[in-house]
Image (cartoon, rainbow, N blue to C red):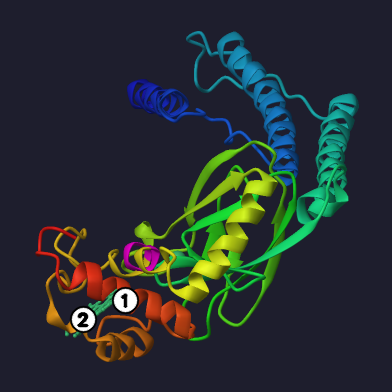
Amino acid sequence: MPRKPLAAVLVAVAALVLGAAASAETGLRPVAPVSPNVERSTDIYYLIAGLTGLVFLAVTIPLVLFIVRFRSRGRDRAVEGPQIRGNTRLELAWTAVPIVLLTIATGFVFYKLPGITDISANPGNRGDFEVRVEGRQYYWQYEYENGVIAIDKLRAPADAVVELAITAPKGDVQHSFWVPPVGGKFDALPGQINETSFRVSKLGIYRGQCAEFCGLQHAAMLASIEIVPRDEFERWLAQEGEAQRAGTSDLGEQEWRGVCAKCHGPKVVGEVGPALEGNPIVADAEAVEAVVRNGRGAMPPVGQGWTEHQMRALTRYLKENVAEADADGG
Ligand code: HEC
Ligand SMILES: [Cu+2]
């Protein structure tokens, strides 16, 4: 057995593990949970890490001791070692111990599972509140019960059970909604609805991303959840509803930044689409609507199924802010 390569591999693995532990904000730990469902899956993570850690030590420590203790010490290769056959107590132990460990792990998972899949099973919940989440190439579109639309950033009230109906429009591709401190990954599949929920008390912005490789600008498909106090949220939702109906909200800007600017413009990584800043076509609402609803060439139909309000918000914003901007402004 050549010793040097083995030592090199061990050192490299140790360096990788230590590097990972030191580099990320949370090291090798999962992100700090802010919703009870994630607390429960984090508990499972720690239990399984503990059990597998114990097994690792119980195997490797004796292994190293035996390697040292029973090494050949220059004994002739042809000499046979002692012939040992069977050890009932040991054999019973290494059958029973794994069964016990697996039973503990399985029991704990099934005990924690209901509160992971159904938030309302956790104590202290009040008020149900639903948002439709659509994964689309390459943005997240949220729709509240009163018709308010938001792109990429979901605003939600603190201390309420927020239910998410996660899907993707027919003809789009598969995405996966994932904001780690708030919930596990949930597939966003065309024509199918997956439901999950969260309840967060700690105000703040929690970040995540699409977790399913969904095409060219997949990496730009970021999601965030902003938790605001409940009364502030309700005020915002009502005001935003009125503003979107009246056409005075910032929806058009959200759409430009969250949908179009990920592909268009001189500052886009890889320049997927032609620069639109200063392009006269963006002042022509009908032409824009046709391209956005139906797609063109390599551009997917990003605006398929958009409401009139939503489309008008975009065309108005483009006309006022993008058509006139110079190519390096925007
Ligand atoms: C996935 C990347 C992508 C996204 C997102 C995207 N586009 Fe495009 N767009 C393209 C590509 C690529 C073309 C060139 C298509 C062709 O002609 O083959 C294009 C072409 C266009 C054109 C025609 C330009 C011209 O000079 O003829 C317009 C207008 C346009 N896009 C507007 C938009 C708007 C508005 C949005 C946001 C609602 C948007 N696009 C989102 C990739 C994208
Ligand atoms: Cu995606």
Q: Circle 1 — which element?
A: helix
Q: Which mark is residue 316?
A: 1
Q: Which residue is mark 2?
A: 283
The quadrant in which the N terminus is found is top left
Tell me the magenta residue range.
254-258
Q: Earlier in the sequence, mark 1 or mark 2?
A: 2
Q: In this orientation, which residue lies closer to the viewer: 209 or 89?
A: 209
Using a 10 Å C-alpha cutoff, classify the residue at mark 2 as few (fewer than 14 neighbours), some (14 to 19) or many (20 or more): many
Q: Circle 2 — which element?
A: helix
The reply to whether the residue tagged 2 has its Cβ within 8 angstroms of ligand 1 is no
Amino acid type shown at disc 2: Ala
Using a 10 Å C-alpha cutoff, classify the residue at mark 1 as few (fewer than 14 neighbours), some (14 to 19) or many (20 or more): some
- Residue 152, image x, y percentages: 46, 60
Q: Which mark is residue 300?
A: none
Ligand 1 quadrant? bottom left
Amino acid type shown at disc 1: Arg
The answer to whether one can see residue 184 in this image is no
The residue that appears at 76% across and 24% down in the rendered structure is 84
Residue at mark 1 to residue at mark 2: CA–CA distance: 8 Å
The residue that appears at 40% across and 25% down in the rendered structure is 19
Magenta span includes 256: yes
